[in-house]
Amino acid sequence: MYQMSDSTDYTELFGLRFAASVVAVVASLLMINNNDKKGKDATGISSVRIVFGTTTGKSESTAASIKDQIQNAFPTLDDLDVVNMAEYDQDNLEQEDVIIFVVSTWSGGSPPETCNVFFDWLADMGSDFRVDKTAFLAKVRFSVIGLGSSDYDSNFCGAAKKLQSLLSDLGATALVKQIGMVDDSVEMDSQVSFYTSRIVDALGGKKAQKPKKKMQPIKKEAQTNEEPEQDEDRINNIMLEEQIGDMEDIVVVGAGSSNEMVTSSQRKALTKEGYKIIGTHSAVKLCRWTKHHLRGRGGCYKHTFYGITSYQCMEATPSLACANKCVFCWRHHKNPVGREWRWKMDDPEMIVNAAVEEHRGMMKQLKGMPGVQPERLIAADTVRHCALSLVGEPIMYPRINEMIDKLHDRKISTFLVTNAQFPDAILNLSPVTQLYVSVDAATKGALKEVDRPLFVDFWERFIGSLKSLKDKGQRTVYRLTLVKQWNMMQEELAEYAKLILLGEPDMIEIKAVTFCGKSDASNLTMENVPWHTEVRLFAEALCEATGGTYGCASEHVHSCCTLLARRDIYQTPTGKWRTWIDYDRFHELVQRFYSTGEGFESSDYLADTPDWALWGAVEEGFDPGETRFKRVRTKKADVVRPPAGLPRSAQ
């Protein structure tokens, strides 16, 4: 202990103590400063959080690529991670240094359902009088990148726009003034890289790279149906300036007529699912029923309803793009979307030749499959039918009539499905063996919810498409896909009946929605799939609603599908149904049409429906000439179904 004496110099003592105090304070300040800098990059960034809100999974993969680019720009940054918005703790938002949001847009410009909690929380904070909303996020720097389709016009990246507004209202500072708006109908990687480089530039990292060449704005091609421009500024801004770093307008990287329809990521996803991509916008794929019929295990519902040979049927499309994003889309929206043709255009003869060759090649690969019948495999080398319903909207292809003609030249029948958004194209369509129009809902509101159309005037186009069927001489069909809790309410029957009167189709197919597994693109579950009994009841009720004009003609229980047909055309006075097609007669008639212009009617190529295919038959629409198998869940063996002819209760 320090001892004081009379001779102690108090001035010196206090000086030493003061100096020690100063040293301690300085040391503390240095420690605080060092702790403050701990984990920071040389540019002063302490953390970067990348939060994604996704519907189909694209936002998640985009967030991962952004993370890689940020890491490359700031190699010493330790606190950098990717978080799902559905799992992000919003209470941490106030403490973030830099946060980047990647969010997709769902129906009507809204965010994905999993993001609603976060969006609602931001909105609540903005309206809470106890919070100084202009300063609440004052220390937070942010940027928003949105994913969507530019074909949705004002709803394009709607969720990202809303998020930008909510964050700005709460005082957060935008790193980049404009929202990154990524169009998923064209190649996304370059767009994401460009927007991320602007964020890096704002944070003091590497400068944004200039594009090697200038991109030109879209040159819009003439539309079959004139559609008024709803956003001229957006169309005019679909370009990149030479000095990209100085650009102040929102950039949307678009595609001109020289661009391919299918992006590399879409091509990869579709190829993985078994599609054979033809040229730049077409595809062909083997149907499971084609393989079933090849093995003698039964044909598809078209075999039951119309007598096609399933193992000689090719499923194809000349356009992978579609004008809807239906909630029940069985391809989970891996294909592009669009309201008009704005891509390269392949020759129709090339498409047909390549599709047939690809199909034949896939069939030959089935030679070693157990149960394949050799005589059917030989016959399968000759394609007799083409279902133009693979994915996308075939009628969008501007040269669809030439393609149909090429198929008919090969004596291949045509079953074309359209999503009822191109009425003029239906009117101008060449004769097809059977023309389908999808009728997915009975009212405007329900159709918007189910089909999620791109067109603003979707309902008018839908009604116009139905009316266009009246002028078609050949067989026409309404296809209803039933989704429980969506479009099969009892009160909608009268509305469906009104739609039937508009187009007076020859037939009505009523089918249960097919559940293709869990998908981020759809919130459908097995609970939305009706049983065949429910489909039958709905079909019978619809027959009554039409006043008896239509009758219950056929059913295919395995597909949960039923067929209604006009009694005045397809039922004889004795009650015999004639829904099958005389294909040889059809080809005679269509060739006569090509050579002389003489028209023909659907009644000119009818054939009798066999007893086993009739409504209520004990065979349930299963061809008795086939052997029915039911796979056991243990996968140890296949069990043969009881022979046809037994009562349903015995089966």
Image (tube, grey):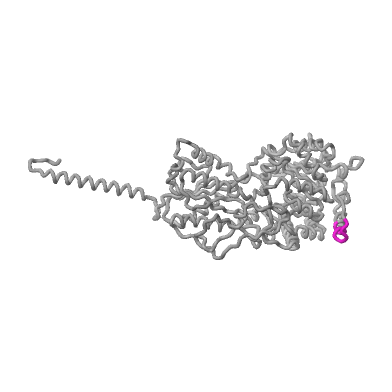
Q: Is residue 81 visible?
A: no
Residue 52, horizontal then vertical, whole percent? 53, 47
Residue furthest to the left? 6
- Range of residues picked out in magenta: 590-598
- Across and down, in percent, residue 224 comes to 73, 55
Q: Main secondary structure of the magenta part?
A: helix
Horizontal placement of 16 versus 498: left or right?
A: left
Task: Answer left or right for 6 relative to 318.
Answer: left
Q: Nearer the viewer, residue 82 or 468?
A: 468
24 or 110: nearer the eye?
110
Say if the magenta span includes residue 593: yes
Residue 161, image x and y in percent?
A: 55, 47
Is residue 10 shown to the viewer in this render? Answer: yes
Quarter of the picture holding the C terminus: top right
**Identity of the residue drawn at 49% across and 45% down:** 167
Q: Residue at the location (72% across, 35% down)?
A: 489
Residue 549 lies in what quarter of the image? top right
Residue at x 30% of width, y 49% of height: 30
